[in-house]
Amino acid sequence: MTTLRRCDILIIGSGIAGLSFARKVEGQGRVVVLTKKGPSRGSTSLAQGGIAAVMDPADSFERHIADTLDAGAGLCDRDAVEMIVRQGPQRVEELIELGAEFSRDDDGGLDLGREGGHSARRIIHAGDATGREIQRVLIESLSGSRIELHDDSLAYELILGPGPDGRNQCYGAWSVEEGEVVGYLAKVTVLATGGAGKVYLYTSNPEVATGDGIAMAFRAGCRVVNLEFVQFHPTCLYHPLERSFLITEALRGEGARLLNIAGERFMPGYDERAELAPRDIVARAIDAEMKASGAKYVLLDATDLGAEVLAERFPHILSRTRELGYDIVTKPFPVVPAAHYFCGGVASDLHGRASLPRLYALGECAFTGVHGANRLASNSLLEAVAFAHAAADDVGKRLADLEAPPDDYRPLTPPEVREPEEMVTLDHDWDEVRRLMWDYVGIVRSDDRLRQAADRLRILNQHTDTLRQRGFFCRDLIELSNILLIGQLIVQSALLRRESRGLHYNRDCPRRDDATGAKNTVLAQYGYSAFTAES
Ligand code: FAD
Ligand code: SIN
């Protein structure tokens, strides 16, 4: 027997995007939030540097807009950028009203940090654990509210139904909960599932970042855009036991310097902004230094900051590195780049609407046009709150006019949960996809490696298809299918872009080509696969 539940608004994901939206639509019917592994286990809780907003009278919206466009290397949507930047101060004030305690300066004003690509100090932060603070207040705001949070609920497929014009529309989603399949039928469904860093072997992202929302949307026929633009954060800690611990860019913002293995500072040789150049430039420079020396890491030297600044501004990093045996107060320590952020995602408009009616996409899983070919540091938390606000406003205006899925609507019967007898082959495929993506579709790409990756991913995909055909269906298999699909979409997008721009660098077409390349890469199934300016 299939369990079907009904609600008005279904939100998939409990990070900054999902919960900011949920708070704003509370009271507009039954609001359900699904989250797959603990409400605070997404990327939001891990955010270190902060949230960018113009809060200093000496700064201006125009400068923040210009910095964002500059980092985006010609591909940002100016309207979307303006929208988030102009909303910034209000959205930050809302977080403060919710109870977020951001770091203050000696006069009690917000302490504004600096990060790469920003021409002014405009990063609002809570020490070096900003995301933890934001996630805390968002979770706390749920208690006493009428929002229903369903934990341990992994949404795996959008439910489609016929719209008035005969086109598909979104009627909700299927989810796996406690070994059972549950269907949620809703008037409006919101994807807020975060990024897909787990596609790569080395990533700053948490376990849940398997690109589920992007995969579900693509399978349902939505357009996905610019998946070749994967941001590699230049500095994750290099340590055998801690492969995903981020070392915030704010540390470089406060003066830390990158050294190669010989102890030489190298960034000024690559870019006049040195350690504060945009991330694509810093990550590629580190990659080049590592390849030249054969070393597995470079060094970050924060010794000039002094013990006091490190303890006060970066307590989280100081204590974690100490636990792992590094004394960053007195010695440079090893860092490496790691997959960090997806600039591409599910195409969504200025209201957060996806190309499938009744579906919205918010936060990192969405492509809004804000980030172009490279995201400016600390703009993603801002994008998530700004678009959550716009989408809540839009849903508020439309909800009363939307019919619920009809009472007699019966979606196709879903599969039953059944694990393969041997998980070892699934584990193997997981490892293989992630290593393949790291080695073949990483910071520096080539046509040959991209084609080899495409071939190998196709074979791995056949294996998961075979398991599905044999009746196996479980969380590991769902997530594996998702990272495989995302890997294929990244490779396909990367092959379509015949130039290098922003985060995408291909040795076989190393130059930016504005005549052919100043366009978004749009993919959709059902025969629609194009390279057009449409978003
Ligand atoms: P997330 O916070 O990742 O939440 C996704 C949610 O969806 C989770 O609750 C997850 O469980 C749920 N979910 C996923 N799949 C499913 C499914 N199938 N079914 C049900 N639930 C599902 N950005 C900044 O602007 N400033 C920073 O300082 C900063 N620092 C960062 C540091 C780190 C280490 C990382 C990893 C990222 C950082 N970023 C930063 C990026 C930023 O944190 C993320 O882009 C942002 O938090 C994404 O928010 P989100 O709500 O879209 O997704
Ligand atoms: C960082 O703190 O370096 C991460 C900031 C970001 O990803 O925006």
Image (spheres, grey):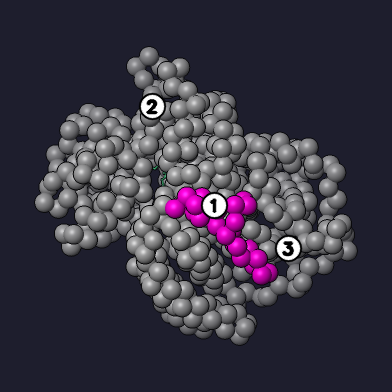
Q: Amino acid at mark 2?
A: Ala
Q: Is residue 533 above or below residue 378?
A: below
**Magenta highlight range:** 513-535
Of the residues tagged 3 and 1, which is closer to the observer? Answer: 1
Q: Residue reaching furthest top?
A: 107
Q: Residue at x 36, y 49 (%)?
A: 280
User: Residue 275 magenta-drawn?
Assistant: no
The disc, 1 or 2, on the residue closer to the chain's N-terminal end is 2
Whether residue 532 sits left or right of residue 413 in the image: it is: left
- Is the residue marked by circle 1 packed among few (<14), some (14-19), or many (20+) residues within 10 Å? some
Give the foreground label among 3 and 2.
2
Assign a secondary structure to mark 1.
loop
Ligand 2 positioned in quadrant: top left
The residue under label 2 is 120
Reply above or below: 357 against 84.
below
Badge 3 density bin: few <14, some 14–19, many ≥20, Cα 10 Å: many
C-alpha separation, residue under disc 3 versus residue under disc 1: 31 Å
Q: Which mark is residue 159?
A: 3
Q: Secondary structure at mark 2?
A: loop
- Label 1, on which residue? 519
Nearest to viewer (mark 1 / mark 2):
1
Secondary structure of residue under mark 3:
strand
Residue at the extreme front: 515
For the point 28% across and 32% down, the residue is: 254
Disc 3 marks a residue whose amino acid type is: Ile
The crowd level at tag 2 (other Cα within 10 Å; few <14, some 14-19, many 20+) is some
Q: Is residue 75 left or right of residue 270?
A: right
Q: Amino acid at mark 1?
A: Lys
